[in-house]
Amino acid sequence: MTDLKNDQERGRQLKVAVIGGGPGGLAGAIELAKLPFVDWKLYEKKAEISETGGGLTIQPQTWKLLERNGAAEHILESDFYRSSDGLIEQRCNGRTGQLLLQKPCPKDTPYHRQSGRCARSKLQTALLRQVDRRYICVGKKLVGLEQLPDSRVRLVFADGDEDEVDLVVAADGIRSVVRKFCFPNHSLTYNGQSVYRAIISKAKAAAIPGIPWAATFWKHISGLYVYTCPLGDDDFEVTMRIRRPHQPGQPEPVSWGHPFDLHTLLDEYRDFCPPVRQILELAAKEGNTQEYAMFSGTRLESAISSGNIAFVGDAAHALLGNFGSGAGFALEDVYALGRALEWAWNRRPSKDQEETPLAQALDLFDSIRSPHYQRLYKILDNFKAIKVNLHAEHRPVDEEIAERVKRISDASEEWMYDYDIVQAVDDTLALLGSGSEVGECVEVYPNSCYYFRFVRKFWVYLVLSLTRILGRSKKT
Ligand SMILES: Cc1cc2nc3c(=O)[nH]c(=O)nc-3n(C[C@H](O)[C@H](O)[C@H](O)COP(=O)(O)OP(=O)(O)OC[C@H]3O[C@@H](n4cnc5c(N)ncnc54)[C@H](O)[C@@H]3O)c2cc1C
């Protein structure tokens, strides 16, 4: 189906298909290319690797990984906006414009790793430049997946092509087709909110009095907000979120990134302060708004399936853009996966080793990433409870806005922005007695989160022991 060399020619033992060419898939390809025993291909349904519309924050932990995988050098200073005060974002009352909160980068973050906001395509292009394009297959929409008796997986594409691989890296986003095959009961539903994103001219945005030169959330109640932020070049981002519940009898929204006439929504924002209303009018006039219906799904308990499928990025979790770090989480996933594969392949097989290296690698990957996502979900659950309780207090609108910002801020945690996946993997490998830095057990979680380290250690032991026991009992 492609003119790639076959496995034997490339001398590689593990055939891997990466499904999806978003940040997770591209960064996954970069990690896999480092492993001499891996023969990989990336399949993307679109006709080219592309990303349109909207901005994306590159957080401190994401910069670290982009420096490591080489993509950072393709992102120029002019490609993104970075606050000169070391701010991640600020929150204002959308009605009055009153500044309620400023959120700084974690303390001691070096300037070159402080949050930066760019058009999504900048990150995509930078990652793509680090990937060997000969192994990218575009126009390949995965439509079928079958587990074969020899533990391989058969992939079927919409154009009729097929491939058989040892490992599938599911990087196919929030509406993951791979996830649907692995977990048929997993449901994904419209959560009643839609996001509208537009990029307008920086010069025109600057001409509106009262628009701050900072990543700014203009908050209202019930999840209604506007977000404004300068990006790189002459770009300025305007994003809006609004509750648009699904009406009975109407088909569920399915649109994602489709053109939208923002004029039809302006009336919903009449309560916002003049600078916000003006910038929305400008965005509507420039006419490049895209609509994103927000979908949420049940949370996966594990990021692996069937011993030969690993979920990374949005396919692995239901975080819905929370923490403004989804691309970073995807990069952490694939880094952990690459290291886990390397560890399993480089290990000397012991006599009692019942599992295949692939199964061991996936268990290790899962033991590092699943608790991470569980920990993030816990924060979201807490936020949800705060919002429900506050709403029930029936305060005046401006008071509710201010109180919501305060309570969410008080309940917020920062560790995810300087989380160090490299140390997390080193730490886990050291724990297993075969890390590259055995014995050097470093603090992975800032703020001395010993409890979580203990839980993760316990989890690693439990997963590895259970899979060994299950492997033995299958044989007997
Ligand atoms: C409103 C909002 C704001 C956000 N803000 C930020 C932010 O500021 N910073 C940040 O880091 N993250 C942010 N995120 C999250 C971020 O966009 C995602 O986490 C990130 O894009 C995930 O990358 P991914 O590669 O896992 O998935 P995606 O980017 O969704 O890529 C999936 C790829 O798979 C392809 N694909 C899908 N199905 C198939 C198939 N069947 N066959 C082949 N290919 C397929 C798609 O075409 C796509 O190219 C935000 C998200 C939302 C919704």
Image: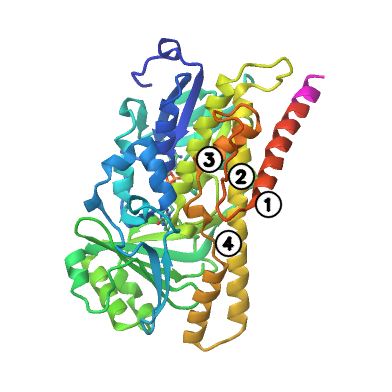
**Amino acid type, callout 4:** Leu
Report the disc number at residue 451: 1
Q: Nearer the viewer, residue 248 or 195?
A: 195
Say which element carries label 2. helix
* Label 2 C-beta lies within 8 Å of the nearest ligand 1 atom: no
Magenta part, dominant SS: helix
Real-space Cα separation, disc 1 to disc 3, in angstroms: 17 Å
Separation of disc 4 and disc 3 at Cα?
A: 25 Å
Q: Earlier in the sequence, mark 4 or mark 3?
A: 4
Q: CA distance from mark 2 to mark 1?
A: 16 Å
Question: What is the three-letter code of the residue carrying label 3?
Answer: Gln
What amino acid does circle 2 point to? Ser
Is any atom of residue 42 visible in this view? yes
Say if 280 sits above or below 155 in the image. Answer: below
| 2 over 404 or under it: above or below | above
Q: Considering the image in quadrants, where does the N terminus appear?
A: top left
Which amino acid type is shown beneath numbered disc 1? Tyr
Give the x, y percent position of residue 111.
Answer: 33, 54
Task: Tell me if the residue at label 1 has its CB under 8 Å from ligand 1.
Answer: no
Toward the right, the furthest residue is 476
Compare marks 1 and 3 and give the one earlier in the sequence: 3
Which is more N-terminal, label 1 or label 2? 2
Q: Residue at x 18, y 74 (%)?
A: 207
SS class, disc 3:
helix
As measured in the structure, the alpha-carbon distance from the residue carrying label 2 to the one carrying label 4 is 15 Å
Mark 1, secondary structure of its residue = helix
Q: Quadrant of residue 235?
A: bottom left
Q: CA distance from mark 2 to mark 3?
A: 16 Å
